[in-house]
Image (cartoon, rainbow, N blue to C red):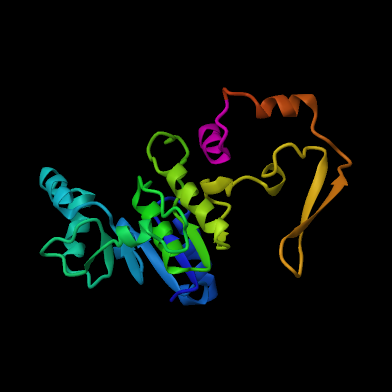
Amino acid sequence: MPSHVAIVGLGPSCATFFELTRRLGGASAWCDEVWGINAIGDTLRCNRVFHMDDVRVQELRAAANPDGNIAAMLKWLRTHPGPVYTSVVRDGYPGLVAFPIEDVLNRKHDSNGGAPYFNSTAAYAIAYAVHIGVKRISLFGLDYTLANQHHAEKGRACCEFWLGIAAARGVEITIPDTSSLMDGCEPPELRLYGYDCVDVTLIDQPEGGVKVAMTERDQVPTADEIERRYDHNRHPNPLVAAGRAA
């Protein structure tokens, strides 16, 4: 059973995973397993791949665009040894494995079972990690909010929902500052709303939990700086704001 898994998607922050593991000497120096989302499965060595789209539907898309990325993905899926977790196992794809949705929705450690809320492949991967008892999840390339492409992707809320469940189970979550997921790209001082005039330090306690220490700041935000935070003409995500400024 892996203790620490890296779930890698196709968003820009996947580059952070490559740079991090390159400097460490390989992915195994960072985590126990690498789980790839969709086409990442043919981009780097993955212990498990998640492709929840029914390949029957993907075949229709590939037939309509034989030179597109879906057709290219199906080509390697037909020979991939797996495991490739998916919704329905189809003939011609030897690596496909049925996602254990019934088991995930009936987790024995949940008094009310699981929530039937999955609107993206990445959300299934996170839920599966929680289901098998992973202790730490690192997420790369799951960005959703991209510069100049705010409406290009959906699924952030569902991933963050399952990450909330993971955190409630005591799972450690790591997100790079190059990703907008869970506001990873925000500076630490902006992650606790309302504490504008004090520096907040969270001190881990030996018996568990944290102690909160506050120190008054020498400089506090001006009225203009505060008003700019509430300016709805500016995009709230700094990655998007930076892209538009460029």
Query: Is 210 placed left or right of 167 in the picture?
Result: right
Membership of 87 in magenta stretch: no
Membership of 245 in magenta stretch: yes
From the image, give the main secondary structure of the stretch colored magenta.
helix
Q: Residue at x 44, y 53 (%)?
A: 112
Height in image: 157 above or below 176? Answer: above
Height in image: 41 above or below 141? Answer: below
Q: Residue at x 24, y 51 (%)?
A: 53
Question: Residue farthest to the front?
Answer: 111
Q: How many circles with numbers are drawn on the protein?
A: 0
Height in image: 62 above or below 41? Answer: above
Report x, y in % for residue 41: 31, 63
Q: Residue at x 79, y 49 (%)?
A: 200
Judging depth in this view, the residue of 101 and 221 nearest the camera is 101
Judging depth in this view, the residue of 62 and 126 nearest the camera is 126
Magenta span: 234-246
Report x, y in % for residue 121: 34, 52
Height in image: 136 above or below 150? Answer: below
Taking the image as drawn, is residue 45 in sight?
A: no
Judging depth in this view, the residue of 60 and 120 nearest the camera is 120
Taking the image as drawn, is residue 189 in sight?
A: yes
Query: Is 56 placed left or right of 227 in the picture?
Result: left
Report x, y in % for residue 157: 46, 42
Query: Is 43 placed left or right of 184 in the picture?
Result: left
Q: Quadrant of the N terminus?
A: bottom left
Report x, y in % for residue 36: 36, 62
